Amino acid sequence: MMAMHRLRRNAIKLEGERSSALDLARGRLVLISAFFGLVYLVFAIRAFDLAVIQAFEMPYESEAVDVVEVEERTETRELSVVAKGRADIYDRNGELLATTLKTSSLYADTHLISDPEKTARELVEIFPKLSYGKVLHKLQSGRRFEWIERNIHPEKIDQVLRIGEPGLDFKESYRRFYPQGESTVHLVGYGDIDAQGLAGIERSFNNYLNEGRELHLTVDVRLQHILRRELESSIRKFEAKAGAGVIMDVTTGEVLAGVSLPDFDPHDPGHAEKDEIFNMLTLGVYELGSVFKIFSTAAFFENKDVPMSVTFDASEPIKVGRHTIRDYHAENRVLSAPEVFMHSSNIGSALMGQAVGTEKLRAFYKDLGLLDPVDFEVREVATPLVPQPWREINTLTASYGHGVSTTPLHLVTGVSSIVNGGYAVKPKLVLDETVSKTSTDVRVVSAETAQRIRQLLRLVVTEGTGSKAEVKGYRVGGKTGTAEKIVNGKYDNKKKISSFIGVFPMDAPKYAVYIMVDEPKGQKDTWGYATGGWVAAPAVARVISSMAAVLGIPPAPEGSAPNHFGDSLRQFVSAKEGGR
Amino acid sequence: MKVLKPRTFIVFAFAALSGALLLYTSQNVQDAQSRLEGYERSIESEKEKIRLLRAEWASLNRPERLERLANEFLDVLPPAPDQMVDRDAANFEIQPAVEFEVERDFEPVLQPVSAGGEVKSHAAPPAPKTKPPAPSREFREQEKKESKDFNKLIGEIGGQP
């Protein structure tokens, strides 16, 4: 009993100690389990979050092509990123010339296609250009990535989705789009399937555009259209092979329009013919003929201190070695300098060239940039063909534009450099507002010579071979050029290059308009003539009159002083030989 | 049984609360992020649409196309050189000023004087007496042949697979 009591008391005592230890342990257990419970709770919430909440927000991503054709995919993706950011090209007035648009291309993961025949049939219905056999072949190829059709129209995307075939999917890509189409293709250029430039500005400014920087060109799409329209109509009328034209701001060298026909659709350069892709403006080198007399005459007056009344004996052809230089519009008499120019006398110009001398004439041509590739923003430029070695006969022929072949752009630039008052200009295609509007300060001819050439150019239109270029009130001046083409090493008098360089207004030149037509054929209403005066001069007149309307250039009122610019030269023109 | 001391309880409660708050915030952030992505996507697609529309606008405004449309539908031609005068140089006759009396005590009227009496607001413009000319068949054929409308142009971009 006693022992029992003691035991109990001990137990109670023991219980007291133990209970506090137990309490402690239990408390810790609760703590730990609460901790684990909390961790589980966190896990559960996170799992719920991932599996339920985020599952609805995550867009479904097709992973079908992940492992397949990784290389192709990453490559096109990189290019696509570049193409996406490729900047737009505008004309000088902010009209869009080139932009990048998103297009979708259709591909198939053939593993996922359950019924290739049915799918192929439906696809051919949507894309009539595809052939059933080819599509079926692709769908049965077993490959996980197979292009079906590139750059499909947004409407067709819906139709393809309606097939409901999970194996058909789209890949977005970016393509260049040229709203002006053919019109500007030889300046703006075009790109490949990944929008990387292959020609023109697209090529020479490829990286610049890829960096997302916009370009403004000096081109005016309205003038471009006018020039192209008139050139095209001349080519059609005279059944010519090709043609080229330029409108240049003579004070800055800015190319306001540049056309080379035939041209092609920049969206589909793959199907363009060789002669369509060929850019006559910068790549075509031609003996441009009498338009070169502007240069030799300028060289003559620049180097010789002579009055306008100086005369040249053009009564007989010049014979140098086995060459004979004749006149096309033969006058067979002694001609004054203005007469040489307005009648486009080869003999007279050759004599001028002879008077200047080989070294000086050559140096002068070099100063005008006629002997070097033209420095232009379009990189596809040709090197002029220059006689090697340059003998005296070459000096004579070069004076009237034979024996030296240059691009049309060379010619317009050279003429601009003279008529603008004598400051050398370079052709420009990219509009740069930071460069001052005045041209470089490199003089190629004195102001006096420039003024004389202006008067002579005006005389050609009022009295000479270029009379069809006259637009009343606009004081057009210019020079015709009719050159025979060399076929198999010989001049072929059936195949001509007929051109006209027009400048207006002649008393204060602002614009040069050049039109060149390759192999025109004489027509009934031109009395069989296909010379520069008949083919190109009227086209230049039409361009100038349309241009004036677009640019809002008012004509000089009748009887006003500017309209009589160059009249003073008439005193050197013999009366009986007036008119054309 | 002292399982939890009040202080511990408070700590736990606080931890749980901040945990919940954190979850809530992170959910909000995710939500906002996905909304942001949505906005960005839609901005991108709007931008793409704008590009497309600008390209279409440029394509529809090709001088060649405008010229064709103007020739067909407008009875006007570009001004010929002899129809233009230099505004600064032209000697326009200046009409002599005519003196006329102004009635001084008039009631301010809140309607056009010329309307006289009731102003017919929102009156429909008079219907043109003649219908605008329908495009000639020739034109439509020409249009079909030459006019690459924008959709066709878009369709034409690019080559074959």
Image: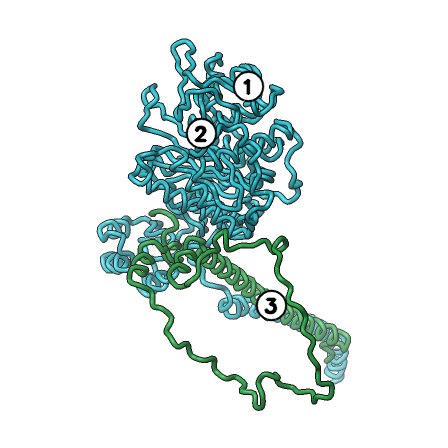
Mark closer to the observer (1, 2): 2
Q: How far apart are marks 1 and 3 (CA)?
A: 76 Å
- What count of labels does the image hold? 3
Count neighbours of disc 2 (C-alpha within 10 A) and say few if under 14, some if 14 to 19, many if 20 or more: few
Give the residue displayed 51% in from the left and 23% down from the top. Answer: A336
Residue tagged 3:
B32
Residue A43 percent location from the top left of the image? 57, 67
Q: Could you classify mark 1 by the number of other residues whose Cα lies within 10 Å: few (under 14), some (14-19), or many (20 or more)?
A: many
The image quarter containing residue A46 is bottom right
The chain to which mark 1 is attached is: A
Chain for colour cyan:
A
Q: Is mark 1 on a helix, strand or loop?
A: helix
- Label 2: state its secondary structure: helix
Determine which residue is flagged by label 1: A361
Inspect this view and state whether residue A75 appears. no
Q: Nearer the viewer, residue B1 or A91?
A: A91
Q: Position of residue A219 (x, y in %)?
A: 52, 45
Q: Mark 3: which amino acid?
A: Ala
Name which residue lies at 57% across and 33% down: A568
Residue B115 position in % (x across, y down)? 57, 85
Q: The green chain is which one?
A: B
